[in-house]
Protein backbone atom coordinates (compact mmCIF):
# COMPACT_ATOMS: atom_id res chain seq x y z
CA UNK A 1 0.00 0.00 0.00
CA UNK A 2 1.22 3.50 -0.80
CA UNK A 3 1.00 6.37 1.63
CA UNK A 4 -1.10 9.49 1.05
CA UNK A 5 0.36 12.55 2.79
CA UNK A 6 -2.16 14.62 4.71
CA UNK A 7 -1.46 18.35 4.60
CA UNK A 8 -3.72 20.20 7.00
CA UNK A 9 -4.52 23.83 6.23
CA UNK A 10 -7.12 24.49 8.95
CA UNK A 11 -4.93 27.24 10.40
CA UNK A 12 -4.42 28.95 7.05
CA UNK A 13 -7.26 28.34 4.56
CA UNK A 14 -9.66 27.38 7.39
CA UNK A 15 -8.84 30.49 9.33
CA UNK A 16 -9.91 32.68 6.38
CA UNK A 17 -13.53 32.00 7.41
CA UNK A 18 -15.12 35.35 8.30
CA UNK A 19 -15.17 35.85 12.05
CA UNK A 20 -13.02 32.79 12.84
CA UNK A 21 -10.31 34.90 14.31
CA UNK A 22 -7.88 32.87 16.38
CA UNK A 23 -5.25 34.36 18.64
CA UNK A 24 -1.73 32.87 18.69
CA UNK A 25 -2.37 30.74 21.77
CA UNK A 26 -5.49 29.22 20.20
CA UNK A 27 -3.54 28.49 17.03
CA UNK A 28 -0.82 26.71 18.97
CA UNK A 29 -3.50 24.73 20.81
CA UNK A 30 -4.99 23.54 17.50
CA UNK A 31 -1.56 22.82 16.01
CA UNK A 32 -0.63 20.66 19.02
CA UNK A 33 -3.83 18.68 18.54
CA UNK A 34 -3.11 18.31 14.79
CA UNK A 35 0.27 16.87 15.77
CA UNK A 36 -1.53 14.33 18.00
CA UNK A 37 -3.76 13.55 15.04
CA UNK A 38 -0.48 12.79 13.21
CA UNK A 39 -1.03 14.78 10.06
CA UNK A 40 2.09 14.97 7.87
CA UNK A 41 2.12 18.75 7.42
CA UNK A 42 0.49 21.72 9.15
CA UNK A 43 0.10 24.90 7.15
CA UNK A 44 0.38 27.24 10.12
CA UNK A 45 -0.45 30.51 8.40
CA UNK A 46 0.45 33.27 5.98
CA UNK A 47 3.09 35.21 7.96
CA UNK A 48 3.19 38.37 5.80
CA UNK A 49 -0.58 38.86 6.22
CA UNK A 50 -0.41 40.29 9.76
CA UNK A 51 1.96 40.58 12.71
CA UNK A 52 -0.39 38.32 14.69
CA UNK A 53 -0.20 35.59 12.08
CA UNK A 54 3.58 35.89 11.96
CA UNK A 55 3.78 35.43 15.75
CA UNK A 56 1.42 32.46 15.65
CA UNK A 57 3.39 30.68 12.92
CA UNK A 58 6.62 31.33 14.79
CA UNK A 59 5.19 29.94 18.03
CA UNK A 60 3.91 26.84 16.24
CA UNK A 61 7.28 26.30 14.55
CA UNK A 62 9.07 26.29 17.88
CA UNK A 63 6.50 24.34 19.94
CA UNK A 64 4.97 21.73 17.65
CA UNK A 65 7.05 18.63 16.92
CA UNK A 66 6.32 15.89 14.42
CA UNK A 67 4.63 17.31 11.34
CA UNK A 68 6.28 19.55 8.76
CA UNK A 69 5.42 23.19 9.52
CA UNK A 70 4.47 25.14 6.42
CA UNK A 71 4.24 28.89 5.86
CA UNK A 72 2.51 30.42 2.85
CA UNK A 73 4.07 33.13 0.68
CA UNK A 74 3.16 34.88 -2.54
CA UNK A 75 5.85 34.81 -5.24
CA UNK A 76 7.32 37.95 -3.72
CA UNK A 77 10.71 38.28 -2.02
CA UNK A 78 9.40 39.99 1.11
CA UNK A 79 6.70 37.33 1.62
CA UNK A 80 9.24 34.54 1.29
CA UNK A 81 11.70 36.18 3.68
CA UNK A 82 8.93 36.69 6.25
CA UNK A 83 7.69 33.12 5.85
CA UNK A 84 11.21 31.80 6.40
CA UNK A 85 11.74 34.06 9.41
CA UNK A 86 8.59 32.55 10.97
CA UNK A 87 9.36 28.85 10.39
CA UNK A 88 13.13 28.57 10.39
CA UNK A 89 13.18 27.11 13.94
CA UNK A 90 10.83 24.27 13.01
CA UNK A 91 12.03 20.68 13.06
CA UNK A 92 10.88 20.31 9.44
CA UNK A 93 10.15 23.70 7.83
CA UNK A 94 8.57 24.16 4.41
CA UNK A 95 7.94 27.33 2.42
CA UNK A 96 4.82 27.22 0.25
CA UNK A 97 5.01 29.64 -2.68
CA UNK A 98 1.96 30.25 -4.83
CA UNK A 99 1.36 32.09 -8.08
CA UNK A 100 -1.67 32.14 -10.36
CA UNK A 101 -1.24 30.12 -13.53
CA UNK A 102 -4.57 30.59 -15.33
CA UNK A 103 -4.76 33.32 -17.98
CA UNK A 104 -7.41 35.13 -15.99
CA UNK A 105 -5.12 35.29 -12.94
CA UNK A 106 -1.98 36.11 -14.94
CA UNK A 107 -3.60 38.90 -16.94
CA UNK A 108 -6.17 40.33 -14.55
CA UNK A 109 -4.32 39.96 -11.25
CA UNK A 110 -0.77 40.63 -12.36
CA UNK A 111 -1.04 42.27 -15.81
CA UNK A 112 1.64 39.87 -17.07
CA UNK A 113 1.88 37.36 -19.88
CA UNK A 114 2.55 33.63 -19.40
CA UNK A 115 6.33 33.90 -19.94
CA UNK A 116 6.75 36.74 -17.48
CA UNK A 117 4.60 34.96 -14.89
CA UNK A 118 6.69 31.81 -15.22
CA UNK A 119 9.86 33.87 -14.76
CA UNK A 120 8.45 35.44 -11.62
CA UNK A 121 7.44 32.05 -10.24
CA UNK A 122 10.84 30.51 -10.94
CA UNK A 123 12.69 33.40 -9.39
CA UNK A 124 10.53 33.13 -6.25
CA UNK A 125 10.99 29.38 -6.05
CA UNK A 126 14.78 29.65 -6.41
CA UNK A 127 14.91 32.30 -3.71
CA UNK A 128 12.78 30.15 -1.36
CA UNK A 129 14.97 27.17 -2.13
CA UNK A 130 18.09 29.17 -1.20
CA UNK A 131 16.60 29.53 2.32
CA UNK A 132 14.77 26.24 2.88
CA UNK A 133 15.39 22.80 1.33
CA UNK A 134 11.69 21.90 1.34
CA UNK A 135 9.68 24.17 -0.98
CA UNK A 136 6.17 23.58 -2.25
CA UNK A 137 4.99 25.39 -5.38
CA UNK A 138 1.28 26.01 -6.02
CA UNK A 139 -0.06 26.80 -9.47
CA UNK A 140 -3.03 28.77 -8.22
CA UNK A 141 -6.26 28.26 -10.20
CA UNK A 142 -4.72 25.17 -11.87
CA UNK A 143 -8.08 23.68 -12.82
CA UNK A 144 -8.71 26.69 -15.10
CA UNK A 145 -5.16 26.78 -16.48
CA UNK A 146 -4.29 25.77 -20.06
CA UNK A 147 -2.96 22.20 -19.57
CA UNK A 148 0.07 22.65 -21.87
CA UNK A 149 1.14 25.77 -19.97
CA UNK A 150 0.61 23.99 -16.65
CA UNK A 151 2.91 21.17 -17.80
CA UNK A 152 5.58 23.70 -18.81
CA UNK A 153 5.40 25.49 -15.44
CA UNK A 154 5.55 22.24 -13.49
CA UNK A 155 8.53 20.91 -15.43
CA UNK A 156 10.53 24.06 -14.75
CA UNK A 157 9.66 24.44 -11.08
CA UNK A 158 10.50 20.79 -10.47
CA UNK A 159 13.82 21.25 -12.28
CA UNK A 160 14.46 24.24 -10.00
CA UNK A 161 13.90 22.07 -6.92
CA UNK A 162 10.20 22.13 -5.91
CA UNK A 163 9.80 19.18 -3.51
CA UNK A 164 6.00 19.30 -3.78
CA UNK A 165 3.89 20.70 -6.63
CA UNK A 166 0.34 21.57 -5.75
CA UNK A 167 -2.55 21.56 -8.22
CA UNK A 168 -5.29 23.62 -6.60
CA UNK A 169 -8.88 23.80 -7.68
CA UNK A 170 -8.87 27.26 -6.15
CA UNK A 171 -12.38 28.22 -7.19
CA UNK A 172 -14.07 24.83 -6.72
CA UNK A 173 -14.77 24.54 -10.44
CA UNK A 174 -13.50 21.02 -11.17
CA UNK A 175 -15.64 17.92 -11.56
CA UNK A 176 -14.20 14.54 -10.61
CA UNK A 177 -13.58 12.77 -13.95
CA UNK A 178 -12.10 15.89 -15.50
CA UNK A 179 -9.91 16.64 -12.49
CA UNK A 180 -8.70 13.02 -12.42
CA UNK A 181 -7.76 13.31 -16.09
CA UNK A 182 -5.86 16.53 -15.41
CA UNK A 183 -3.74 14.78 -12.75
CA UNK A 184 -3.01 11.79 -14.98
CA UNK A 185 -2.17 14.15 -17.87
CA UNK A 186 0.34 15.92 -15.61
CA UNK A 187 1.82 12.58 -14.49
CA UNK A 188 2.22 11.57 -18.13
CA UNK A 189 3.41 14.81 -19.73
CA UNK A 190 5.74 16.33 -17.13
CA UNK A 191 9.00 14.47 -17.77
CA UNK A 192 10.55 14.99 -14.31
CA UNK A 193 7.31 14.50 -12.32
CA UNK A 194 8.78 11.53 -10.43
CA UNK A 195 11.22 13.90 -8.69
CA UNK A 196 8.44 15.55 -6.73
CA UNK A 197 5.23 14.87 -4.83
CA UNK A 198 1.99 15.85 -6.60
CA UNK A 199 -0.48 17.53 -4.27
CA UNK A 200 -4.09 18.66 -4.69
CA UNK A 201 -6.05 21.37 -2.91
CA UNK A 202 -9.77 21.27 -3.66
CA UNK A 203 -12.52 23.69 -2.70
CA UNK A 204 -16.10 22.73 -2.07
CA UNK A 205 -18.10 25.31 -4.05
CA UNK A 206 -19.96 22.53 -5.85
CA UNK A 207 -19.80 20.06 -2.97
CA UNK A 208 -17.13 18.07 -4.85
CA UNK A 209 -13.97 18.76 -2.85
CA UNK A 210 -13.71 15.28 -1.31
CA UNK A 211 -14.63 13.52 -4.56
CA UNK A 212 -12.10 15.58 -6.52
CA UNK A 213 -9.35 14.87 -3.99
CA UNK A 214 -10.05 11.12 -4.03
CA UNK A 215 -10.04 10.83 -7.81
CA UNK A 216 -6.79 12.81 -7.83
CA UNK A 217 -5.04 10.24 -5.63
CA UNK A 218 -6.31 7.46 -7.89
CA UNK A 219 -4.58 9.30 -10.73
CA UNK A 220 -1.24 9.85 -9.05
CA UNK A 221 -1.54 12.63 -6.46
CA UNK A 222 0.13 11.67 -3.17
CA UNK A 223 -0.59 14.68 -0.98
CA UNK A 224 -4.05 16.01 -0.15
CA UNK A 225 -4.56 19.47 1.30
CA UNK A 226 -7.60 19.58 3.55
CA UNK A 227 -9.07 21.11 6.69
CA UNK A 228 -10.82 19.89 9.82
CA UNK A 229 -14.62 20.05 9.47
CA UNK A 230 -14.10 21.20 5.86
CA UNK A 231 -13.63 24.80 7.00
CA UNK A 232 -12.12 27.24 4.55
CA UNK A 233 -12.59 30.08 2.14
CA UNK A 234 -16.22 30.35 0.88
CA UNK A 235 -17.82 26.87 0.88
CA UNK A 236 -14.68 25.46 2.42
CA UNK A 237 -11.98 22.94 1.59
CA UNK A 238 -11.93 19.18 1.26
CA UNK A 239 -12.58 17.90 4.76
CA UNK A 240 -9.76 16.00 6.41
CA UNK A 241 -11.98 13.54 8.24
CA UNK A 242 -13.80 12.57 5.03
CA UNK A 243 -10.59 12.03 3.04
CA UNK A 244 -8.91 10.03 5.80
CA UNK A 245 -11.94 7.88 6.62
CA UNK A 246 -12.74 7.22 2.95
CA UNK A 247 -9.18 5.96 2.40
CA UNK A 248 -9.33 3.84 5.58
CA UNK A 249 -12.86 2.48 5.20
CA UNK A 250 -12.43 1.68 1.50
CA UNK A 251 -8.83 0.50 1.52
CA UNK A 252 -10.12 -2.53 -0.42
CA UNK A 253 -10.78 -0.09 -3.26
CA UNK A 254 -8.11 2.62 -2.90
CA UNK A 255 -5.23 0.50 -1.57
CA UNK A 256 -3.69 3.52 0.18
CA UNK A 257 -3.09 4.47 3.79
CA UNK A 258 -2.46 7.65 5.79
CA UNK A 259 -0.53 8.11 9.03
CA UNK A 260 -3.47 9.87 10.72
CA UNK A 261 -4.48 8.54 14.13
CA UNK A 262 -8.20 8.43 13.41
CA UNK A 263 -9.07 8.07 17.10
CA UNK A 264 -8.16 11.75 17.52
CA UNK A 265 -10.61 12.93 14.83
CA UNK A 266 -13.59 13.80 17.03
CA UNK A 267 -11.47 15.57 19.60
CA UNK A 268 -9.80 17.65 16.89
CA UNK A 269 -13.10 18.43 15.23
CA UNK A 270 -14.62 19.68 18.48
CA UNK A 271 -11.61 21.75 19.41
CA UNK A 272 -11.57 23.47 16.02
CA UNK A 273 -15.32 24.03 16.08
CA UNK A 274 -15.19 25.51 19.57
CA UNK A 275 -12.21 27.78 19.12
CA UNK A 276 -13.35 29.06 15.73
CA UNK A 277 -16.97 29.42 16.84
CA UNK A 278 -18.11 27.39 13.84
CA UNK A 279 -20.65 24.72 14.86
CA UNK A 280 -20.60 21.46 12.91
CA UNK A 281 -23.87 20.62 11.15
CA UNK A 282 -25.54 17.59 12.76
CA UNK A 283 -25.57 15.50 9.57
CA UNK A 284 -21.94 16.27 8.64
CA UNK A 285 -20.12 13.11 7.50
CA UNK A 286 -17.89 11.52 10.17
CA UNK A 287 -17.99 14.33 12.77
CA UNK A 288 -21.65 15.47 12.84
CA UNK A 289 -23.63 14.78 16.00
CA UNK A 290 -25.89 12.42 14.05
CA UNK A 291 -23.19 10.73 11.98
CA UNK A 292 -23.51 7.57 14.07
CA UNK A 293 -27.05 7.96 15.36
CA UNK A 294 -29.45 5.35 14.04
CA UNK A 295 -33.00 6.54 14.43
CA UNK A 296 -35.05 4.30 12.16
CA UNK A 297 -36.49 1.30 13.99
CA UNK A 298 -35.38 -1.12 11.29
CA UNK A 299 -31.84 0.20 11.45
CA UNK A 300 -31.73 0.06 15.26
CA UNK A 301 -32.91 -3.51 15.16
CA UNK A 302 -30.21 -4.42 12.64
CA UNK A 303 -27.51 -2.65 14.66
CA UNK A 304 -28.46 -4.58 17.77
CA UNK A 305 -28.07 -7.89 15.89
CA UNK A 306 -24.81 -6.93 14.23
CA UNK A 307 -23.35 -3.43 13.97
CA UNK A 308 -22.07 -4.12 10.45
CA UNK A 309 -25.64 -4.27 9.12
CA UNK A 310 -25.87 -0.49 8.99
CA UNK A 311 -22.52 0.79 10.22
CA UNK A 312 -19.50 1.09 7.92
CA UNK A 313 -17.29 2.84 10.48
CA UNK A 314 -16.90 1.84 14.11
CA UNK A 315 -17.57 5.00 16.20
CA UNK A 316 -14.55 4.23 18.40
CA UNK A 317 -12.28 4.38 15.32
CA UNK A 318 -12.91 8.12 15.09
CA UNK A 319 -12.65 8.59 18.85
CA UNK A 320 -16.27 8.42 19.96
CA UNK A 321 -16.41 6.74 23.34
CA UNK A 322 -19.27 6.45 25.76
CA UNK A 323 -19.24 9.31 28.21
CA UNK A 324 -16.67 8.23 30.70
CA UNK A 325 -17.40 9.17 34.28
CA UNK A 326 -14.25 10.75 35.42
CA UNK A 327 -14.35 12.70 38.61
CA UNK A 328 -16.49 13.77 41.54
CA UNK A 329 -16.12 16.55 44.08
CA UNK A 330 -14.14 14.17 46.27
CA UNK A 331 -11.61 13.27 43.59
CA UNK A 332 -9.10 15.84 44.79
CA UNK A 333 -6.28 17.79 43.24
CA UNK A 334 -4.12 14.85 42.32
CA UNK A 335 -6.79 13.03 40.32
CA UNK A 336 -7.77 16.22 38.53
CA UNK A 337 -4.15 17.02 37.70
CA UNK A 338 -3.68 13.51 36.34
CA UNK A 339 -6.81 13.79 34.21
CA UNK A 340 -5.75 17.17 32.84
CA UNK A 341 -2.30 15.98 31.85
CA UNK A 342 -3.84 12.88 30.27
CA UNK A 343 -5.86 15.27 28.12
CA UNK A 344 -2.64 16.83 26.94
CA UNK A 345 -2.63 20.06 28.96
CA UNK A 346 0.19 21.36 31.05
CA UNK A 347 -1.16 23.64 33.79
CA UNK A 348 0.78 24.96 36.72
CA UNK A 349 0.35 27.15 39.78
CA UNK A 350 -2.41 29.69 39.63
CA UNK A 351 -3.90 28.34 36.39
CA UNK A 352 -4.31 24.91 37.90
CA UNK A 353 -5.77 26.31 41.14
CA UNK A 354 -8.37 28.26 39.17
CA UNK A 355 -9.31 25.12 37.24
CA UNK A 356 -9.60 23.23 40.50
CA UNK A 357 -11.94 25.83 42.01
CA UNK A 358 -14.18 25.83 38.95
CA UNK A 359 -14.11 22.05 38.89
CA UNK A 360 -15.29 21.92 42.50
CA UNK A 361 -18.18 24.27 41.86
CA UNK A 362 -19.25 22.24 38.81
CA UNK A 363 -18.86 18.97 40.72
CA UNK A 364 -21.04 20.39 43.49
CA UNK A 365 -23.83 21.04 41.05
CA UNK A 366 -23.70 17.97 38.88
CA UNK A 367 -22.04 15.23 40.92
CA UNK A 368 -20.43 13.47 37.96
CA UNK A 369 -17.95 15.44 35.91
CA UNK A 370 -17.21 14.15 32.43
CA UNK A 371 -14.07 14.51 30.31
CA UNK A 372 -15.75 17.11 28.14
CA UNK A 373 -16.66 19.20 31.18
CA UNK A 374 -13.07 19.19 32.39
CA UNK A 375 -11.90 20.08 28.90
CA UNK A 376 -14.15 23.13 28.79
CA UNK A 377 -13.17 24.36 32.24
CA UNK A 378 -9.48 24.03 31.35
CA UNK A 379 -9.88 25.94 28.10
CA UNK A 380 -11.89 28.69 29.74
CA UNK A 381 -9.16 29.17 32.29
CA UNK A 382 -6.41 29.10 29.69
CA UNK A 383 -8.05 31.88 27.74
CA UNK A 384 -9.01 33.86 30.81
CA UNK A 385 -5.31 33.91 31.63
CA UNK A 386 -4.45 35.68 28.44
CA UNK A 387 -3.89 38.71 30.61
CA UNK A 388 -3.57 41.23 27.81
CA UNK A 389 -6.96 40.38 26.36
CA UNK A 390 -8.75 40.59 29.68
CA UNK A 391 -9.73 44.12 30.42
CA UNK A 392 -12.97 43.15 32.18
CA UNK A 393 -13.79 40.04 34.12
CA UNK A 394 -17.22 38.71 34.94
CA UNK A 395 -18.29 38.79 38.59
CA UNK A 396 -22.02 38.07 38.88
CA UNK A 397 -25.49 38.85 37.57
CA UNK A 398 -29.09 39.06 38.76
CA UNK A 399 -32.13 38.90 36.54
CA UNK A 400 -35.73 39.92 37.26
CA UNK A 401 -38.17 38.41 34.82
CA UNK A 402 -41.61 36.84 34.62
CA UNK A 403 -44.82 36.73 32.57
CA UNK A 404 -45.81 40.15 31.25
CA UNK A 405 -42.78 41.83 32.82
CA UNK A 406 -39.92 43.47 30.96
CA UNK A 407 -36.82 41.50 31.93
CA UNK A 408 -34.21 43.47 33.81
CA UNK A 409 -30.62 42.44 34.49
CA UNK A 410 -28.04 43.75 36.94
CA UNK A 411 -24.47 42.78 36.06
CA UNK A 412 -21.21 43.19 37.96
CA UNK A 413 -17.86 43.22 36.19
CA UNK A 414 -14.38 43.88 37.47
CA UNK A 415 -11.88 46.18 35.82
CA UNK A 416 -8.46 46.83 37.38
CA UNK A 417 -9.67 45.56 40.77
CA UNK A 418 -12.67 47.89 40.67
CA UNK A 419 -16.21 46.53 40.65
CA UNK A 420 -18.47 48.11 38.06
CA UNK A 421 -22.23 47.64 37.98
CA UNK A 422 -25.11 48.46 35.67
CA UNK A 423 -28.76 47.62 35.20
CA UNK A 424 -30.56 47.32 31.88
CA UNK A 425 -33.83 46.12 30.40
CA UNK A 426 -34.02 43.88 27.37
CA UNK A 427 -36.24 41.78 25.12
CA UNK A 428 -35.30 38.76 27.17
CA UNK A 429 -33.03 38.02 30.12
CA UNK A 430 -29.99 37.40 27.90
CA UNK A 431 -30.57 40.57 25.91
CA UNK A 432 -30.86 42.48 29.20
CA UNK A 433 -27.56 41.01 30.42
CA UNK A 434 -25.77 41.97 27.20
CA UNK A 435 -27.19 45.50 27.38
CA UNK A 436 -26.05 45.86 30.99
CA UNK A 437 -22.53 44.80 29.95
CA UNK A 438 -22.57 47.37 27.13
CA UNK A 439 -23.57 50.02 29.68
CA UNK A 440 -20.66 49.13 31.95
CA UNK A 441 -18.08 49.21 29.18
CA UNK A 442 -19.69 52.29 27.63
CA UNK A 443 -19.96 50.96 24.09
CA UNK A 444 -22.57 49.41 21.87
CA UNK A 445 -21.90 46.04 20.25
CA UNK A 446 -23.81 44.54 17.38
CA UNK A 447 -24.75 40.95 18.20
CA UNK A 448 -24.19 38.89 15.05
CA UNK A 449 -24.62 35.38 16.33
CA UNK A 450 -25.48 33.70 19.57
CA UNK A 451 -25.67 30.02 20.37
CA UNK A 452 -25.97 27.90 23.46
CA UNK A 453 -25.15 24.25 23.41
CA UNK A 454 -25.34 21.61 26.11
CA UNK A 455 -22.12 19.67 26.18
CA UNK A 456 -23.11 16.67 28.22
CA UNK A 457 -26.46 15.00 28.07
CA UNK A 458 -27.73 15.32 31.60
CA UNK A 459 -30.16 17.73 33.18
CA UNK A 460 -27.33 19.61 34.91
CA UNK A 461 -25.42 19.84 31.64
CA UNK A 462 -22.57 22.27 31.17
CA UNK A 463 -23.85 24.88 28.74
CA UNK A 464 -21.41 26.52 26.37
CA UNK A 465 -22.43 29.87 24.94
CA UNK A 466 -20.82 31.31 21.83
CA UNK A 467 -21.30 34.97 21.03
CA UNK A 468 -20.20 36.81 17.93
CA UNK A 469 -20.19 40.60 18.15
CA UNK A 470 -19.01 43.55 16.09
CA UNK A 471 -17.98 47.09 16.87
CA UNK A 472 -16.56 49.51 14.26
CA UNK A 473 -14.38 47.39 12.01
CA UNK A 474 -13.76 44.76 14.70
CA UNK A 475 -15.50 41.46 14.89
CA UNK A 476 -14.80 38.82 17.52
CA UNK A 477 -16.27 35.84 19.24
CA UNK A 478 -16.31 34.81 22.83
CA UNK A 479 -17.22 31.64 24.64
CA UNK A 480 -18.30 31.01 28.15
CA UNK A 481 -19.39 27.98 30.04
CA UNK A 482 -21.37 27.26 33.15
CA UNK A 483 -24.11 24.93 34.31
CA UNK A 484 -26.23 28.10 34.21
CA UNK A 485 -26.81 29.25 30.63
CA UNK A 486 -27.35 32.90 31.59
CA UNK A 487 -23.97 32.95 33.28
CA UNK A 488 -22.39 31.14 30.31
CA UNK A 489 -23.87 33.78 28.00
CA UNK A 490 -22.61 36.66 30.15
CA UNK A 491 -19.12 35.15 30.29
CA UNK A 492 -19.11 34.66 26.52
CA UNK A 493 -20.18 38.25 25.91
CA UNK A 494 -17.55 39.65 28.26
CA UNK A 495 -14.86 37.56 26.56
CA UNK A 496 -15.91 38.83 23.14
CA UNK A 497 -15.89 42.43 24.41
CA UNK A 498 -12.41 41.91 25.86
CA UNK A 499 -11.19 40.64 22.54
CA UNK A 500 -12.52 43.69 20.76
CA UNK A 501 -10.59 45.93 23.17
CA UNK A 502 -7.53 43.76 22.66
CA UNK A 503 -7.78 44.01 18.88
CA UNK A 504 -8.42 47.70 19.09
CA UNK A 505 -5.35 48.20 21.24
CA UNK A 506 -3.22 46.38 18.69
CA UNK A 507 -4.94 48.10 15.77
CA UNK A 508 -4.10 45.20 13.56
CA UNK A 509 -7.52 43.68 13.04
CA UNK A 510 -7.73 40.10 11.97
ZN1 LIG B 1 -7.65 27.32 -0.77
Image (cartoon, rainbow, N blue to C red):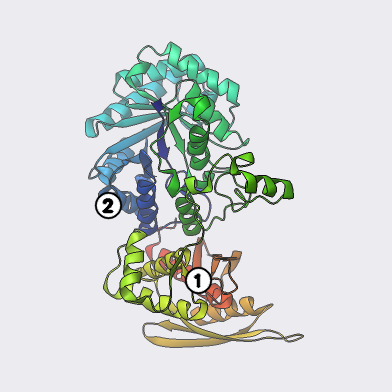
Can you give x and y, in whole percent of width and height, for residue 202 in the image? 52, 33
Please tell me whether residue 42 is drawn above or below residue 190 in the rendered image: below
Front residue of this view, candidates 198 and 161: 198
Mark 2 crowdedness (10 Å alpha carbons): few <14, some 14-19, many ≥20: some
What kind of element bears circle 2? Answer: helix
Classify residue 425 as left or right of residue 396.
right
Front residue of this view, candidates 51 and 320: 320
User: Residue at coordinates 53% horizontally, 75% vertically from top-left?
Assistant: 483
Can you give x and y, in whole percent of width and height, for residue 264 in the image? 43, 49
Can you give x and y, in whole percent of width and height, for residue 230 in the image? 53, 44
Residue position marked by numbered label 2 in the rendering: 63
Label 2, label 1: how many angstroms apart (C-alpha)? 28 Å
User: Residue at coordinates 27% horizontally, 44% vertically from top-left?
Assistant: 87
Residue position marked by numbered label 1 in the rendering: 481
User: Residue at coordinates 53% horizontally, 44% vertically from top-left?
Assistant: 314
- As drawn, the label of residue 261 is none
Classify residue 344 as left or right of residue 248.
left
Can you give x and y, in whole percent of width and height, for residue 288 in the image? 58, 50
> Where's the C terminus, which quadrant?
bottom left
Classify residue 342 as left or right of residue 262.
left
What kind of element bears circle 1? Answer: strand
User: Residue at coordinates 37% horizontally, 29% vertically from top-left?
Assistant: 137
Which of disc 1 and disc 2 is earlier in sequence?
2
Please tell me whether residue 176 is drawn above or below residue 490 in the rendered image: above
Amino acid sequence: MEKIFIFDTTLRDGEQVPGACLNPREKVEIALQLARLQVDAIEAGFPISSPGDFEAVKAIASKVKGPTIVALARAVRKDIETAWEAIKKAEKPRIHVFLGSSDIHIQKKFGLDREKALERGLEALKFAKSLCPDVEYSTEDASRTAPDYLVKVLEQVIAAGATVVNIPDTVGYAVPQQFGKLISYIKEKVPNIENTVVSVHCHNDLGLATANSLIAIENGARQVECTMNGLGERAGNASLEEIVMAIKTRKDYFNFYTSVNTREIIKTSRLVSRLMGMPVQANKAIVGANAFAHSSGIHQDGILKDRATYEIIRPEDVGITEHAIVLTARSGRHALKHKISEMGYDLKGEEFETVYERFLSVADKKKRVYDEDVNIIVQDVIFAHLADTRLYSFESYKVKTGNGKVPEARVRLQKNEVILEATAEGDGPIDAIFKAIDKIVGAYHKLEDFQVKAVTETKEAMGVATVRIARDSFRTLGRGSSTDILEASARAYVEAVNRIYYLQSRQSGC
